[in-house]
């Protein structure tokens, strides 16, 4: 509330981050059970986070900030509850840990009503820049604007928070998960197996191709962000 009031009184363009922690491990919120850390507690804390977001929107509306504000709602990561024998997060590249919501919304309806099959977190910045008319061809960025149609589903490279624990490549409908410790690659078909229960066989040539692409991507990341 204090932050919203400060923003409204400043009378200037602003960028603000609202980061609710209720639904983060250990899922400690008003409706959860202390020290239980269960899926039920997680669900209750997600509801509390949604409630807090609704209160924020109400406050923005009261202060007259809604009409010219873009809201971007995104998760930073998912959560495992034993789907592949793992719990919490940052431990695997399966969809329960890497698939998160991404919603762009503004009260004036400038974005229309579009459903994009999938996107990446790196697409957020260029989408905002595009919406604001601030795209610059001479400024290299990772990601693409989701307002444009020429390549709505680019490849998605991803990795666990801890270096060397796991990485993946998603090119619909196929998802490839690389285990660096064993140099093994697993493939899933999301059309027929959205919960990644039945890995498919991959021939040696395809295995080498995908692993080389994943390694090349991270080599590029290291060259661009050497001190990350």
Image (cartoon, grey):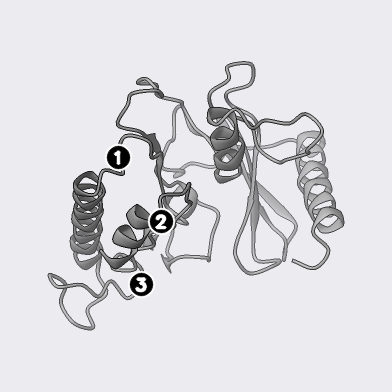
Residue under the image location 59 percent in, 29 percent down: 130
Looking at the picture, how far across and down is residue 200, in whole percent? Answer: 58, 37
Mark 2 or mark 1, whichever is nearer to me: 2
- Name the residue tied to disc 1: 66
- Name the residue tied to disc 3: 25
Left or right: residue 182 versus residue 196 is right
Residue under the image location 53 percent in, 23 percent down: 147
Left or right: residue 152 versus residue 75 is right
Nearer to me, 32 or 197: 32
> Quadrant of residue 41 in the image?
bottom left
Mark 3 or mark 1, whichever is nearer to me: 1
Q: Which dot marks residue 175?
A: none
Q: Residues within 10 Å of mark 2 (few under 14, many from 20)?
A: few
Extreme residue toward the bottom, this view: 35
Q: Which dot marks residue 10?
A: 2
Nearer to me, 103 or 152: 103
Mark 2 or mark 1: whose residue is earlier in sequence:
2
Looking at the picture, how far across and down is residue 100, in whole percent? Answer: 42, 47
From mark 3 to mark 1, how far is it between C-alphas?
Answer: 31 Å
SS under mark 2: helix
> Quadrant of residue 149 in the image?
top right
Extreme residue toward the top, this view: 150
SS under mark 3: loop
Mark 3 or mark 2, whichever is nearer to me: 2
Looking at the picture, how far across and down is residue 32, in whole percent? Answer: 16, 72
Residue under the image location 79 percent in, 41 percent down: 213
Q: Residues within 10 Å of mark 1 (few under 14, many from 20)?
A: some
């Amino acid at each position: 509330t204090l932050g919203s009031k400060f923003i409204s009184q400043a009378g200037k363009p602003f960028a603000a981050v609202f980061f609710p922690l209720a639904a983060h491990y250990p899922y400690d919120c008003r409706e959860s059970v202390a020290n239980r850390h269960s899926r039920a507690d997680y669900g209750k804390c997600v509801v509390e986070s949604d409630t807090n977001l609704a209160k924020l929107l109400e406050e923005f509306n009261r202060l007259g900030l809604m009409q010219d504000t873009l809201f971007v709602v995104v998760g930073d990561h998912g959560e495992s509850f034993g789907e592949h024998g793992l719990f919490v997060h940052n431990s695997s590249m399966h969809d329960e840990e890497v698939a998160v919501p991404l919603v762009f919304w503004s009260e004036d309806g400038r974005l229309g009503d579009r459903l994009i099959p999938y996107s990446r977190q790196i697409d957020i910045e260029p989408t905002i820049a595009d919406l604001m008319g601030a795209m610059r061809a001479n400024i290299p960025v990772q990601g693409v604007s989701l307002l444009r149609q020429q390549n709505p589903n680019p490849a998605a490279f991803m990795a666990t928070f801890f270096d060397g624990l796991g990485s993946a490549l998603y090119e619909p409908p196929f998802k490839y998960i690389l285990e660096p410790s064993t140099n093994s690659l697993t493939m899933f078909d999301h059309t027929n197996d959205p919960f990644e229960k039945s890995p498919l066989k991959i021939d040696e040539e395809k295995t080498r191709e995908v692993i080389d692409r994943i390694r090349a991507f991270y080599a590029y990341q290291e060259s661009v962000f050497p001190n990350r």
